[in-house]
Each structure stands twice: as C-alpha cells, then as structure tokens.
Amino acid sequence: MTYFELVTEARRTFDRADAAGITEHVAIQFNATGNAQGAFYLEIADGQIHVEPYDYHDHDAIVTGSAEAILDFLGRKENLANLIREDRLSVEGYLDKVERILAISMPEQDRSL
C-alpha cells in the first residue's frame, strides 16, 4: 500500500460517518511506517471530520504504526488496546483523544454487496 492509498482509504472510512455527538476539538496525527510512510491527520471540529495528508503541529496525540494497523483501528477491525499491547501501534499524547475516534457514528455496512 502506498501513502496515497492509505490517505484515500482513511478518508473513505469516514465518508458517511457522523461526529455530531463529539463537541470537543480532536486532532490526531497518524505517522505511517513501512511502504506507506508519511503523516496525515484526522480532525474533528464542530461535528465535522477532516482527514488530510499533512502533519498537524497542534495535535492532541500522535499514533504511529503500519498502514494496516492504522486502518484496522480506524475501521474498527482491531481494538486499540490490543494494537498497542501487540506493539502494532504506539500513542504519544492524550490517549483519551485518540479513543474519541471510537465515538464517531459509523454508517451501517451495506450487506447486499
């Protein structure tokens, strides 16, 4: 997976998601390692979700890991605690802000595909 593919997939994950229930500002920088090496951020502001291919210097936390581990967390395929325990992701900064991502309401999966 390339960096471009990683950012595209992260954006796609939150295309139809709803963060209206999150009232505080959340800014998480993700540092991908391996073939998709690079930084991108996920920001929640005023109930809106933004995923952009830049570093975020005023972040609440930095999450570092492979593209696969990052996408597993963002897509809720893997539990954050397990990813950290297995040393697939590391978190610097406010862990509670990273966990706020889990409060984003995700759309139901289309089961007809």
Image (cartoon, rainbow, N blue to C red):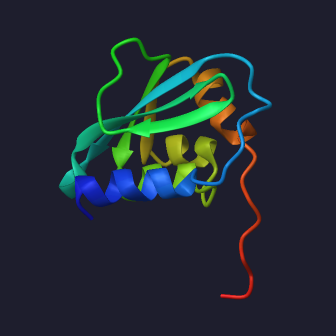
Residue 71 rendering spot, x and y as whole percentages: 47, 55
Left or right: residue 51 versus residue 36 is right
Q: Is residue 40 above or below residue 95?
A: below
- The quarter holding residue 99 reads top right
- The quarter holding residue 38 reads top left
Residue located at (72% from left, 53% from top)? 106
Residue located at (27% from left, 65% from top)? 1
Residue 13 rendering spot, x and y as whole percentages: 55, 56
Residue 67 rendering spot, x and y as whole percentages: 35, 54
Q: Is residue 27 above or below residue 82?
A: above
Left or right: residue 48 versus residue 103 is left
Residue located at (61% from left, 17% from top)? 25
Q: Is residue 88 above or below residue 111?
A: above
Where the C terminus falls, by quadrant? bottom right
- The quarter holding residue 81 reads top right
Of residues 12 and 29, which is closer to you in this image?
12
* Numbered circles on residues, count: 0
Left or right: residue 106 versus residue 57 is right
Residue 5 rendering spot, x and y as whole percentages: 31, 60
Q: Residue furthest right?
A: 21
Q: Residue furthest bottom?
A: 113
Residue located at (31% from left, 39% from top)? 53
Of residues 11 and 84, which is closer to you in this image?
11
Q: Residue furthest top?
A: 58
